[in-house]
Amino acid sequence: MMKQSSWRPMTEPGFWAGFLVILCTLSTAVDVHQALKPTSMNSKVIQRHKREWKWDKLYLYEETFPKTPLEKIGKLDNTLYNEMSTRYILSGEGANDIFTVNDMGDIFVSTALDREEKSVYRLSASLINIQTRMQIDKDDPFEIVLLDINDNRPVFPPALSGSISESSREGTTVMTVEATDADDPTTKNGMIEYKLLNGTDLFHINSKGVISTVKSTLDREKQSQHLIAIQAKDLPGSDTGNIATTIVTINITDINDNIATFKTGKYRFNVKEDSKPGSEIGTLTVEDRDEIQNKDPTFTIHHDGFAIKLSNVKDGILSLTVPLDFETEKTYSFNVDVVEHTVSKSPDNQGPQLLKRAEVFINVIDVDEPPVFNQTEYKFSVYEGPFKNPIIGAVSAKDPDIKGYKIRYSIEDSNCPVTVDSVLGHLSLKRQLDREQESSYTFQVKAQEDTPNGQISYAMVNLKVIDINDNAPELTNGSYVYVCESDKSGTVIGIIGAHDKDENPGRFRFTLAKKSSNFSLHDNQNNTANIVLKQEGFSTEHSVEHVLEIEISDGGTPEQKSINPLHIKVCTCQSDRRTDYCMAYAQTGVSVSVILAILLCIITILVIVILIALRRRYQKDTFVTLGKSSGEIHEQLVSYDEEGGGEMDTNGYDVSILTSACHDSSFRPSTGPSLYAMVKKPPACKGDMAMMIEVKKDEADHDRDGIPYDTLHIYGYEGSESLAGSISSLDSSSSGSNLEYDFLSDWGPRFRTLAQLYGVDGSDTDSSY
């Protein structure tokens, strides 16, 4: 086992005595080791001796500067050490730099060390063979501990401050001050004691730095802040040591310990008489040494026309509650009291000399005021309809000033139905009023002093229009009255009512203005009446209009009556009288003269149509029976487009070639019948052109090899042998014709273009169309 020993620097007492003991011990150990060594390397008996390191900790004072030669702080010692063959090696913190070791195991320090930077250095010692550099014994750790010296002063935190309420009790803690010392806190070098350098009559500080009050007489109003010098010293209990001082700010916080009082016993204010209620007059300043948050004055005013409230700084603001009138009262005087209920039990300011009541004087200043109406709002009523006396009332205003100017009245609204007398203020109707159109009117009357730039004021006038019984009742629910085909005699087919535009109509009475054989009316005495079926058998197939004339009276004064027609429709209904189909009749309201005019127009149109038809028939017959040769009828060959686009789809051709082809044998084939002879002649009667056309169409439809119907041979064949007369221009002469061809339009759509070309307005000369 390793024996522990404590090493001290050579300057400590007893150092040499200990050192001699160690030397003796080491010498004895060496002798014993040499005596026990084997005499021969070949000896078979080998005895192992106990080895050990003989140290644990070394101690060194900080800030010890090295000397020349270096001062030894300790010595390594191992039982295996041999001066000739072994050497000590250091490793660890500061080894071979701060701390060195020689061949004998002496440890030296080469620089001054600071315990506050590092207080313990941990190293290891080892023993190696000089030649082989092999480690003989295992490493053994040890420590070098720096011993503290008083080389640091106490340090205070910056800007130390605290607070305490004024009038606090004796011994009340204000704050705690704590200084720090970098020296070893386990020694007196790092221990601190505190001391007040001033303010000891008010404050005290203990050994832990707690500052407390000595008295209860702190007064913020006298001194709101105290600056206290505090000293901190280490090595407590001794006259020596490091010292530090600082200044601590102690703020005295406010409490409500002062009563609010008036600064003066009298306050005077001037107020214009036109000041509005609620306007501020002035400020009643009070004196209170407390801070704003601790001011709590209460004001009491002894006058109903004025009020007082707190300002932002807790002064009293005087305001007006009623209008002022210089002509009535020119001055006011009253008292105002101030008290403070939340003040501490023992206020700083007290006594009968405090001004808790003040007298206020108000001086009213005269101004030019506008006219004042005797009422702020006027209300009048008038009956609707015609009136005998247009005056409905009057307004009145006067000048409140001493001068007393005359007043002129006017109404600025041009749409107002009322006018005002500019001098007397009488209000008169300009026109008749109707309550059903507008039941009330609101307008302003202007009053102005009769002087240049005179003062102006307005008054509101409300005019109510009173209702009279001037509207006749009207029938309602008439559309819900109908007769079902299945209704039996005595069935209530509907309930009618009445409506009156008047404000409070009386009870309506219903009667039949004319008796009806089919229906009766029963007045229900509740502003309704039943329509009752007297006989059954109605049907929607019979066109009969059923109208009841119902007389309604309102029973007012004067009584108003009206006769209202009720149209009753006949319906096909289901079992619960739900309608499926109704035959309704409405009154046309067309007069006899209108009917006669319509009939006369219809007759005139029919006569004109008949005359036109007869004329065209006559022209057709004349054209057929004239017996003129076909040569006198000349036409142009016209081709029609199948789509029928009108005149734009027609093309005109030169018919001279066709005429020559009809008479020139060169165009005929040498064998076979003529082209025109192949055409089958229809057996048509005189004028039966339609039949001929149908025959030709049938031929074209059934003969695939035949020439189409509208080709050249049709027009070529038509000529002298046509029963209806030729309409072709193949043999027509070049001279004009006086015939009218309008009747061709009756032959069908294929001939309408011809009728347009050769009609009355068409040209009778050859054309290229």
Image (cartoon, rainbow, N blue to C red):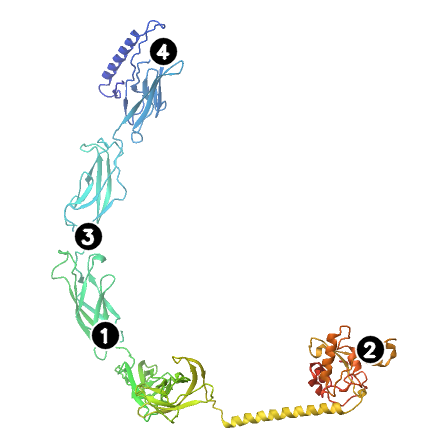
Report which quarter residue 79 is drawn in: top left
Of mark 1 and mark 4, the one earlier in the sequence is: 4
Residue type, mark 4 in image: Met
Q: Name the residue under label 3.
A: 220
Closer to the eye: label 2 or 3: 2
Residue type, mark 2 in image: Leu
Residue type, mark 3 in image: Arg
Q: How far apart are the two marked residues, 1 and 2, measured between alpha carbons?
A: 129 Å
Residues at badges 2 and 3 in contact (C-beta under 8 Å)? no
Of the 4 image quadrants, the one containing the N terminus is top left
Of mark 2 and mark 3, the one earlier in the sequence is: 3
Of mark 1 and mark 3, the one earlier in the sequence is: 3
Identify the disc placed on residue 675: 2
Identify the disc placed on residue 268: none
Q: For this view, does 201 lie left or right of residue 324?
A: left
| Secondary structure beneath label 3 | loop
Closer to the eye: label 1 or 2: 2
Position in image of residue 366 (x %, y %): 26, 77
Of mark 3 and mark 4, the one earlier in the sequence is: 4
Report which quarter residue 351 is drawn in: bottom left
Q: Name the residue under label 4.
A: 84
How crowded is the residue under tag 4: few (<14 C-alpha within 10 Å), some, or many (20+)? Answer: few
Residues at badges 1 and 3 in contact (C-beta under 8 Å)? no
Closer to the eye: label 1 or 4: 4
**125 or 255, nearer to the observer:** 125
Of the 4 image quadrants, the one containing the C terminus is bottom right
Q: How far apart are the two marked residues, 2 and 4, measured between alpha carbons?
A: 164 Å
